[in-house]
Amino acid sequence: MTQSKTLIVGDIQGCFSGLMSLLAKAQFDERKDTLIAVGDLVARGEDSLATLKFLMSLGSRFRTVLGNHDLHLLAVSQGIKPAKKNDRLSNLLSDKHLPDCVDWLRQFPLALKVDTQTVVVHAGLYPQWSVSELLCYSEEVSHSLRGPNWRILLQQMYKNSPQIWSDKLQGISRLRFIINACTRMRFLKADAALEFATKHHPNDAPAGFQPWFRVNNDKLLPNEKIIFGHWAALDGETHSDRFIGLDTGYVWGNKMTALHLESNSVVQVSP
């Protein structure tokens, strides 16, 4: 009897055919294997609706963290923000199952502990946080997102401030920072402030900007590793076995990547 496997897939972004090709190449068995995603399940690809329907069909064999595009879909679905044409969400937004998709999505966290060593988060681990703090802060957001006032959270999350973390942050400012760090972070300034405008490769970063994974984090334990997505221009190049980037830009014509957790091997497909 073959052993079940765990696949962690990078940003899918509604690229249903690419996801199917990747799972076929990885010999993913829907009956016994587990699929975990780094977030951004939807938007910009050819069929976000089919993507969500398939992932929902996996039941407990699928888990994900929420990415910025997933949160934006929730906001768009409630009329909080308009849909962008290039997000190609029209078939999903007009489908009768949209409310089911929305309720399903908002049950997922911003950070997920896969095993004793492995944590998945869409954008990364803010360098002033430990893994245990990250998981606690994720649960703070989840408590609001799963609760009766979840639409208020979505209405108030669209700001870049505050940009620096403090344990004293409260209310929506605290939740917004947690959301931004977990779903939008790429570069940090010298004072550990989040910087959102710069999206290119670290080799081309302005002076004084550091990718979050190169900023010293003395709270990260030696055996812990962070698996993330979000940063297509990075193309997975962290030069570290502790920070594993799985967004390799399939939606932009590059590759879709999955990590086979048990063997620590990578599977990729191109469009």
Image (cartoon, rainbow, N blue to C red):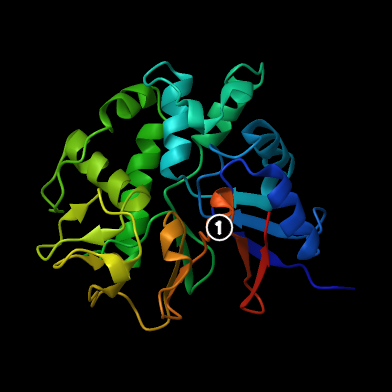
- Who's the residue at 49% across and 25% down the image? 85
**Image quadrant in which you'd find residue 165:** bottom left
Instruction: Name the spot of residue 228 as percent of width and height, x first.
Output: 45, 61
SS class of the residue under badge 1?
loop
Between 212 and 196, the residue placed more toward the observer is: 196
Residue receiving disc 1 = 10
Hey, what amino acid is under mark 1?
Gly
Q: Is 150 rendered above or below residue 238?
A: above
Q: Residue 20 vs residue 151: left or right?
A: right
Instruction: Name the spot of residue 166 as percent of width and height, x first.
Output: 12, 53
Name the outermost residue toward the bottom. 222
Between 180 and 85, the residue placed more toward the observer is: 85
Q: Quadrant of the C terminus?
A: bottom right
Question: Number of marks in the image?
Answer: 1
Q: Residues within 10 Å of mark 1 (few under 14, many from 20)?
A: many
Q: Quadrant of the N terminus?
A: bottom right
- Who's the residue at 46% across and 45% down the image? 66
- Who's the residue at 50% across and 43% down the image? 108
